Image (cartoon, helix red, strand yellow):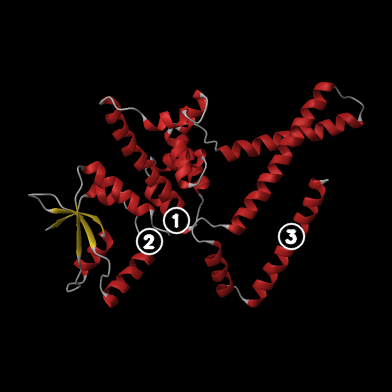
Amino acid sequence: MIRIDEEFKSLIPPLTDEEFKQLEDNCVRDGIRDPLVVWHVPDSDDILIDGHNRWEICAKHSGIQFNIRRMDFNDRDEAKLWIMSNQLGRRNLSEVDRITLEDKMQGVLAKQAKARIKSGAENPTKKSLQGQGLTESQIRRQNSTDYKIARAAGVSEDTVRKVRAINKSPDADRLKEQIRSGEISINQAHNIVQVAKAEAEGRIPTTKSQKKRQEVQEATERNEAYEQAKGDGVISFTDAKQNKDDKQTIARSWYEEIKSALKKLYWTGALNKTELFAQMRETLTESERKTLVEEIKDVRTVLGVALMELEE
């Protein structure tokens, strides 16, 4: 008998409805080619650790044959690490799911490391970092969970913290599904979580992006006041220094807007660029495509001017 362990099942990122339907059609048409992987537990039922969607399809469509691959593990933590490592090998894993899995994996690894240290074993990671001539501060950072997850997932530590906050939200499943589909970004989902948390605590919700917009607005107003004061001949060293800082704030805001726009063109968070542009070519009408091409050309011209100005 094969048993479903809900904790193990929860480690596996869910398929979208479209992905599940595609897998179901393939299994019904071609059969199940890859074996279901189970943890062979002596004197007990085998526990499914890979192939939950295929198992569900088999239960739905009687008569589909499948093979089983049995594996042995020393304990549940070892089984969890295998499940997560296997999932991280999936090429189509979304960024939010990759970070979530890396976070869970680091939790299990940290638990094992504590057990080894408690038993008198050395911390091999810290010893290795010390051998690289790093400072204590650098060692602490590189030995931190957030740093390890960020390195493994190829994201910033700030993104790791945002995903962790999303996972703690009551709406985590819905938000992650929207991130997977490209409907919202991780930053947008995090803003939604922060606003909901503030409202629940009776505070006025203020997201990081809202704070930045407010800072730019205030800087712009001070800059206008400075220009007026300069025209009237009323200016001080303090005002001039403040204006310089305000101009930097405004310039950084422009830079972030340009970077954000380019990132949206290059990467949706749900599809890679090749798939994205292929879909655009299929769905846009000839007129829409020509309009978009002209708009991109305009952007390219503006960026060319920006490059010349900034490289001087």
> Quick check: 137 above or below 4?
above
SS at badge 1: helix
Q: Where residue 244 sits in the image (x, y, percent)?
A: 78, 31
| Residue 23, position as x, y percentages in the image | 33, 68
Q: Amino acid at mark 3?
A: Arg
Q: Classify residue 23 as left or right of residue 255.
A: left
Q: Residue furthest left?
A: 43
Q: Please, which residue is most extreme toward the front here?
A: 131
Real-space Cα separation, disc 2 to disc 3, in angstroms: 36 Å
What kind of element bears circle 3?
Answer: helix
Please state which amino acid type lies under the numbered disc 2: Thr
Residue at the image position 23 percent from the left and 49 percent from the top: 6
Q: Identify the residue under disc 2.
A: 16
| Mark closer to the observer (2, 3) | 3
Q: Nearer the viewer, residue 17 or 159?
A: 159
Give whichever of discs 3 and 1 has the lower sequence position: 1
List the residue tagged with mark 3. Answer: 300
Residue 200 visible, this orientation: no
